[in-house]
Each structure stands twice: as C-alpha cells, then as structure tokens.
Image (cartoon, rainbow, N blue to C red):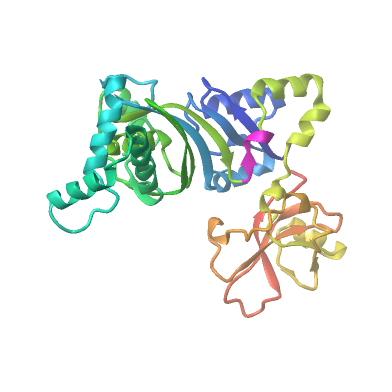
Amino acid sequence: MHHGMLTVYKEAGYTSSDAVARLRGILRMRRIGHTGTLDPDAEGVLPMCLGNATRICELIADREKEYVALMRLGVLTDTQDMSGEILHKIPDEEIPAMILKSGMKAPLQMEPGTRETAVNQAEEYMHGKDEEKLITDSILRTAAAFIGQIEQVPPMYSAIKVNGKRLYDMARKGITVERKPRSITIHALEIEKIELPFITMRVRCSKGTYIRTLCEDMGNALGTGAAMQSLLRTRVGQFTLHEAHTLDELEHFAKNEPDRLLPLIRPVDSFFADLPAAACTEDALRLLKNGNLLTTEEFRFLSEEEDPQREWRSGEVFDLQSLPGVNPGEQVIRMYSADRSFYGLYRNKAGSRDRSRYSAYKMFLPEL
C-alpha cells in the first residue's frame, strides 16, 4: 500500500476514470482516486491520490489550475471542441474581416451616448492602423475582457448532474436543458500565438472552469465563433507538468525500476507544507494515535530546519478557507510523532477559551 500523491500525465484517449483503473493495476492497489475530471481528448497534469491521501482528493481538485489551449476560430460544435459535430463553419479567409467588424462593435471604451458615438470612436481608433495590428488588438482586448470573476454556463457535454442525470447522457440523446450560469475566476489569460484561424492561449483559472466554453464565448465575442482544438493542463495547484509521468512510464518503473517509482510519490503532508509543523512528546503518542485532544504541553512546534517537508514549502500563506469547516481566526497545524511520522492536522478553534488546546481536524494515520 502506497500513501501519497502521484502526478500522472494523462494522455488523449483516456478518461480520468480510465487512468485510475489502469494505475490500480500498475500499483496493485485499490485505494486510488483522481482529483477532478479531465476531458478524454485533453492531456496533461492529473494528480492521483494513493492510500490515505484519498482524503484530500477534493482539496486538490479545488486548487487553481493552468492550461494551454488551442482555439480554432470560425467553428461551432455541439461539444464546444473539435471532437463534436460541426454546427456552423465559416471560411478561414472571412475570419479576419469578421474580427475587424467585431472591433467596430466593441471599441476600447464605450462611453455613454448613442451608437453613432461608439462607431465614431472605433473608427478614430482604427484610423491609420494596419489590418494585422487591428486584429491583434481586437483579440487582446477580447481576452482581457474575460479576466476576473465572470459567469459561465456549463456545457451540455459535461459531468454535471441535473435532477440526478448527467448532462452528457442527456446531450447524447439530443436533449438540451437549461443550465444556470456559474461564477468562475479567470486569474490570467495570456495570448501566446496568433496564427489565424488558430489562437494559442495560456489560462490560469479557478476550479469549475470549462476551457471549451471559454473558447466558444471568446469566439462569439470576436464575431467568428470558436471551438477548442486541443487542451494541455500544465498545473493543478502545486502539481506541475515537469513532474508528471505517463502511465506507460509508471508501468515500466513498477515492473523494472521500482526504485525510480517510489520517489515520485509525494507524501501527503507535503500538500500542507505551508502550515506550521509540530511534534508531540513520546508520552502523548497514544493520544495522537487516537486523535485525542492535545495541549501545548504535549507537543512543540518545529523549526524550519526540523520540518520534514521543508523542501515543499512555498513560503505562501496556506489558504485556510479551502479547508471545510475551518473558520477565520483558527490555527491549523501538521502534527507529527516524535520520530517525525505524520499523523494528521490539528486545529486551535477560534473563540476557544483555552488557546493551548488543539483538537484533531483530519487524521492520516501512517499505520493504515
């Protein structure tokens, strides 16, 4: 039984569940969970939780994500990517003119007034600029408009449930239902390359963001429509592309080079490396193993040099709001035994009269 997180590079053609099933066979263990669905045609980072790390699958799934997407302008499909049925397509040679036309409709600053004022403002802005520069400016302005907190309508081809039924099951039967917009956050949206009809962009976003939908919405804003051509997830929270390995690589390591496999499994406490660390006394180990209350007389805080997971510390403040049930003003710490075995998270509750008392929040017993 392995305990920890393993960063898998999911290749196209696998569902997230397929990847879990194959990894179970490779590692010969059942207790494995993935950290959020990645579309079958998408590739990239898919953190897997092994053993007692399955208790933090949802916490990892809630983390910020980064993608590199290739968007194809001039196409609309029923799935919002190029795997679906094409509903509408315009010739590639017409795309530049349509983008320019959309630029006339959406000038840089729409001041209060009449439509004529807005059009005059757009014409004044465009005067003397070449077509390629205007197209680039229009694309960059459109991208900038999607940065921040926005509303996004989930696609029909998604795993979201409505009245107990998956949307993609209904979509395959030709059924379309109303979906409520969801609030998401686009932290950054960088246009990396423009080679019409294709646009490559890097997106850093909150959980629940559908990049397929973002592509279509941006394409509609540009007046051309769009579908996602390809998608690469480069990061999920602290899990990055450079540490990811394909399932074929992991299978090779497991069969032929197990010494190379074990270092790839990150200990579960590394996920919480930015929280303070503490070690209980030998006399209090029995209390710790049972998840009992501990006081500051029964443990001591560890220095940075003593921290077992100091190599994973980012120096950032851990977002306690991401931990269910933790309130502002509380302190959450990693609790170890005297020999530095990780047992779980303890917290000092806000409003507690005795600030020396810490109770168990989430346990990861090493014996299990």
Residue 161 placement, left or right of 367: left
Give the mark count.
Answer: 0
Q: In terms of image quadrants, where is residue 367?
A: top right
Q: Is residue 97 magenta?
A: no
The furthest residue to the bottom: 353
Residue 159 placement, left or right of 275: left
Residue drawn at 70 percent across, 22 percent down: 249
Q: Is residue 239 magenta?
A: yes
Residue drawn at 27 percent across, 35 percent down: 100
Between residues 160 and 232, which one lies in front from this camera angle?
Answer: 232
With respect to residue 322, does 254 lie above or below?
above
Image coordinates for residue 27, horizontal then vertical, percent: 71, 27
Location of the N terminus (image quadrant)? top right
Residue 1 appears anywhere in the view: no
Location of the C terminus (image quadrant)? top right
Residue 201 appears anywhere in the view: yes
Image coordinates for residue 358, horizontal then vertical, percent: 68, 68
Residue 208 placement, left or right of 142: right
Which region of the structure is painted magenta? 238-243
Q: In terms of image quadrants, where is residue 294?
A: bottom right
Image coordinates for residue 29, horizontal then vertical, percent: 69, 29
Image coordinates for residue 98, horizontal then vertical, percent: 25, 31
With respect to residue 145, does 333 lie above or below?
below
Residue drawn at 65 percent across, 25 percent down: 246
The furthest residue to the front: 128
